[in-house]
Amino acid sequence: MADMLELECPGCTGMLELDAGFAGGVCRCSECGTLMTVPADPGTHRAERLSRPDAPGATGRPDTPMPNTETPAPEPTAAATEQADGETFVTDTGRVVRIGHDAVIPTASKKRAVIRATTAVAFFAVVFFLLALMGGAVWLMTREAPPPDTSHLELQTFVFDRDANPWTMDKPNVLGMSLGAKASIVVDASGRSSAWLADVKSAIAAGLTRADSRARVAVLYATAKDVQTLGGGMQAIGNLNADRLLRFQEGFEAEGEPPVRKAVETAIGFEPEAVILVIGRRLDSTELDRIKSLLLGNETLLDVVAVGRDDPALEDLAEQTGGRYQFIARSTLENWRAEASP
């Protein structure tokens, strides 16, 4: 932006502004038309009105007309010749200013209120505020919700005893893992469980038939066809017997790769304290993330019994929910069953 001079019009006393490039010259007021000088330094000098010497009230006007003479006019001087090339004006203080005929006289415009910078700052401040507001809204809508606080949940004390045979333990258990007051048990009957599924079925049937227990359980199988639930939901352990459990389980074969997430979601629907997952394969990260979201969203613990294959990812997921993790080798399971056989 060009530098501007501020002038006070000597005619209408209005405040004017003019490009600084015209300093030391002349200009005309846009409001009243007054012709004036443009001081080189408006801070120390004021603009002066310009008028022709023969104008009424002009400084230097002769009091009486010059007498007529018959004397021939002398040859014009250099000054006269120079004066003929332009117009001469005088200021109110008597200073003579000559303006050429071809000179372009700029017009000083009325000074506008100094709001440009303030307006620009205010505009950009509003734009920045709106952008920040929109960005914050987008961030709130897209960010992941923090996991619920599960610190208030009472964790179950658990120490896995490899010498404790689930077929012969006197307390309700799932492959040696103790139960709380209310639990959902999910068995993954995928094709990779074929080597141990029969032993797990037998161990679960033995571990859940304890007449003196007040615990309640829901037994679910994730199968290639669908999620199968014993009795449609929670059952009192005291009302279960081994034959009933075995009949329920015998129709499920180890095949395919059933969606464990769907079985966990069904298990959570029974509002257990914990979901006990019996599994012998590794799940992909997408499946794990979905299961994690379900568990944390419902403040449900996850206990994992990994059979035949140790799984650090499932161990980490169990810890995140405040649950337990135990790996059982196939050989251990086989030895337990052999010990329990008559």
Image (cartoon, rainbow, N blue to C red):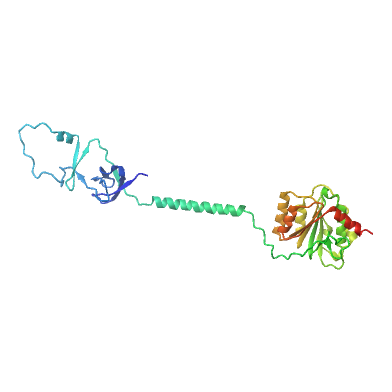
Left or right of 28 in this view: 295: right
Q: Residue 229 versus residue 21: which sits nearer the camera?
A: 21
Residue at 18% across / 45% down in the picture?
95
The C terminus sits in image quarter: bottom right
Q: Is residue 197 visible?
A: yes
Q: Residue 69 versus residue 144: which sits nearer the camera?
A: 144
Left or right of 73 in this view: 206: right
Image vertical order of residue 171 relative to residue 113, above or below: below
Q: Looking at this view, name the residue that lies furthest to the right.
A: 342
Corner quadrant of residue 336:
bottom right
Q: Residue 302 versus residue 104: which sits nearer the camera?
A: 302
Left or right of 333 in this view: 53: left
Q: Position of residue 69 (x, y in %)?
A: 5, 35
Residue at 40% across / 51% down in the picture?
117
Corner quadrant of residue 150:
bottom right
Q: Is residue 270 visible?
A: no
